[in-house]
Image: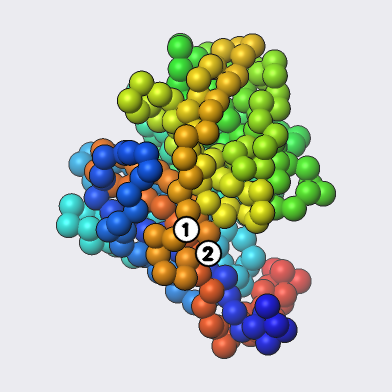
């Protein structure tokens, strides 16, 4: 990329959704509807959840001016019409990857708070727009894209632990387990259970399909979030962890799309993201504004 292109090209992540289709290998990628962010922002890491008959997409809403992400959400009706994005969680540090969990105790969210060296659990006190910090689950290390899956009477937490000196996306998969969301988390005996940059970093909900525990992961071997690797967990106990690669989902589903690093679904909708280069003649102004904001906020 030339200096002129760097000055005016903005790498903009976007999210997309479609009606739920049968999960298959390989996964057909037709019919997605794009939700494009305003200038100076990008949308990424979408999660979808249903509550009281309504569906919502939660996602990272990154603002160039502040150089950090907040968590926003959009309501989507049965016809696929979307509301305007609404900011539902903002902190002094960057937020991303709003993992959602609906239980008998309530609706919870674990956003990526690696910028704060924590894994934080939030509870919806008035879903979907009001959330409170329920507890800090772990702290003292940089963990991204934490994802929880219940299995064999325990809760399993998968997270990407990163070395601060390593490039974005480079990290190792660590697993922790507990008797409940509010118990103390114990490290898996074989941590890190996966050190392969093609499959270590989570890329969305873990789910059960056709007799297999499916774990999407980000392929970060060549660049951050280049594609999604779909894996099957074949052994998960306190002392053992095994998985096998099934297939890859690339960014080619959309013209000029360069990356794809999140896949999620519920009973009604599927959500993904992507990245395209857009020309933004005001990008230098936005960068200067962000420098001013960071210095004088």
Q: Measuring from the top left, give residue 98's x and y in whole percent.
A: 49, 45
Picture quadrant of residue 50: top left
**Compared with residue 196, is residue 187 higher up or lower down, i.e. above or below?**
above
Q: Report the side of 191 relative to 57 (left or right).
A: right
Image quarter in which the N terminus is found: bottom right
Q: Is residue 183 visible?
A: no
Lower position in the chain sequence, tag 2 or tag 1: 1
Residue beneath disc 2: 258
Whether residue 215 sits left or right of residue 94 in the image: it is: left
Q: Position of residue 112 (x, y in %)?
A: 58, 44
Residue 237 seen by the camera: yes
User: Which residue, given by chain and number where applicable, does mark 1 sit on?
Assistant: 251
Q: Is residue 96 left or right of residue 267?
A: right
x, y percent for residue 214: 44, 30
| 108, above or below 39, in the image | above
Question: In which quadrant of the rendered image does the C terminus lie?
Answer: bottom right
Query: Disc number at residue 5?
Result: none
Q: Nearer the viewer, residue 166 or 139?
A: 166
Residue drawn where x is 66% and y is 48% of the image: 221
Is residue 106 depicted above or below 75 in this figure? above
* Front position in the image: 283 or 231: 231
Helix, strand or loop status at disc 2: loop
In what element is the residue under mark 1?
A: helix
Q: Badge 1 local density, few (<14 within 10 Å), some, or many (20+)?
A: many
Q: Identify the residue shown where x is 56% and y is 67%.
A: 63
């Amino acid at each position: 990329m030339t200096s002129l292109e760097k000055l005016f090209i903005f790498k903009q992540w976007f999210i997309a959704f479609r009606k739920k289709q049968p999960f298959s290998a390989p996964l057909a990628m037709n019919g997605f509807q794009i939700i494009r962010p305003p200038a100076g922002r990008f949308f990424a890491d979408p999660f979808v959840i249903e509550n009281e008959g309504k569906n919502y997409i939660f996602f990272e809403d990154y603002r160039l001016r502040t150089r950090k992400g907040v968590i926003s959400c959009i309501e989507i009706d049965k016809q696929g019409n979307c509301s305007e994005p609404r900011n539902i969680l903002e902190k002094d540090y960057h937020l991303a990857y709003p993992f959602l969990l609906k239980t008998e105790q309530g609706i919870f969210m674990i956003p990526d708070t690696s910028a704060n060296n924590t894994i934080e659990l939030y509870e919806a006190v008035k879903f979907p727009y009001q959330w409170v910090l329920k507890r800090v689950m772990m702290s003292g290390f940089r963990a991204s894209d934490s994802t929880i899956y219940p299995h064999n009477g325990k809760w399993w937490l998968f997270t990407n632990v990163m070395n601060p000196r390593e490039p974005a996306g480079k990290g190792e998969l660590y697993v922790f387990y507990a008797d409940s969301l509010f118990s103390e988390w114990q490290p898996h005996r074989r941590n890190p259970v996966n050190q392969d940059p093609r499959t270590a970093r989570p890329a969305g909900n873990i789910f059960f399909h056709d007799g297999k525990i499916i774990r999407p992961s980000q392929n970060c071997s060549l660049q951050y979030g280049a594609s999604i690797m779909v894996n099957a967990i074949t052994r998960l106990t306190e002392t053992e962890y095994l998985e096998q690669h099934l297939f890859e989902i690339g960014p080619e589903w959309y013209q000029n799309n360069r990356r794809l690093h999140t896949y999620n679904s519920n009973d009604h909708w599927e959500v993904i993201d992507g990245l395209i280069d857009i020309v933004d003649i005001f990008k230098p102004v936005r960068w200067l504004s962000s420098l001013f904001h960071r210095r004088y906020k």
